[in-house]
Image (tube, helix red, strand yellow):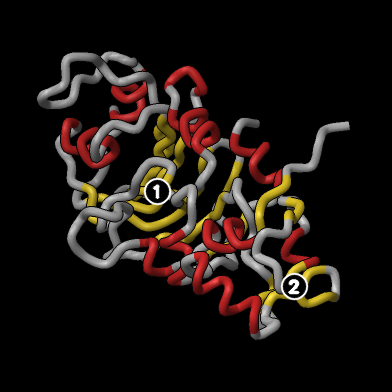
Amino acid sequence: MSKVPMARLDRLLANLGYGSRREVQGLLRKGAVVFDGAALSDGGQKIPVVPDLPERMTIEGAPVDPPAPLTLLMHKPLGVVCSHREPGRSVFELLPRRWRARMPGLSTIGRLDLDTTGLLLITDDGPLLHRVIAPRSHVTKRYVARLARPLRGDEAAVFAAGTLMLESETEPLAPATLEPLSDTEARLTITEGRYHQVRRMFAAAGNHVEALHRDQIGGLSLPPDLAPGAWRILKPDELSAIFA
């Protein structure tokens, strides 16, 4: 049986973004931290860091935030960026404010540009992040593109050939799968994540992407009932679906 990880209460809550250790002590003094039905007052007390912690601990009457590792599925809306450093509103501003102070910090698994919507994964799990984006994992990403001009008819063959070169690149793209949905709409599945790859692929084919939406990563699909800007925590079976 594996040993249950333990953490000092004050350090745990500080790492979850509830404030500095001094601020956490203030929560403890007023009885705001309850674990298994009992108010806690000792910041040095060791607490089990287990997945069901939000079911066992409350902060000011609300379930404590889940401990690391944490992975979220977000429906990224238009007009937000996927970086802490880029100018403009960030996807991290759609999360609880205190989550920006979590340690380890949250990062997006890959990026969607300002004008692309759809399935975005956010995690503090470094090994998971690298496993998803690693070329050897061959995790697919599926997009629906609305185009400015009708498809010519040869794009599927061009993208599947594995010989398409993008401007300023020195290596051809891996084969990709194109499924026309109408004259000006197509579903494209890729295994790489080069800079603005889908838009540049259609540009190389003489077209222009007017709208782009990602609806699937690996075997994980964007839930149809998840509104733009909404997010939820992924379950273990959903994490496994990414690599299915």
The answer to whether the residue labelled 2 contacts the one labelled 1, judged by CB atoms less than 8 Å apart, is no
CA gap, disc 2 and disc 1 = 51 Å
* Residue 40, numbered label: 2
Foreground tag (2 vs 1): 2
Q: Is 195 left or right of 109, judged from the image as shown? A: left
Q: Is 158 left or right of 117, judged from the image as shown? A: left
Which sits earlier in the primary sequence, circle 2 or circle 1? 2
Crowdedness of circle 1 by 10 Å Cα count: few (<14), some, many (20+)? many
Quarter-wise, where is residue 174 in the image? top left
**Percent coordinates x, y for residue 9 in the rendering:** 66, 60
Decide: is 125 above or below 167.
below
Q: Is 222 left or right of 83, judged from the image as shown? A: right
**Percent coordinates x, y for residue 63 in the rendering:** 69, 72
**Residue at x-position 70% and y-position 67%:** 42
Decide: is 28 above or below 153.
below
Q: Secondary structure at mark 1?
A: strand
Residue placed under numbered mark 1 in the picture: 144
Q: Quadrant location of the N terminus?
A: top right
Q: Quadrant location of the C terminus?
A: top right
Residue type for callout 2 = Leu
Q: Kindly give the residue lying farthest to the left in the view shown.
A: 168
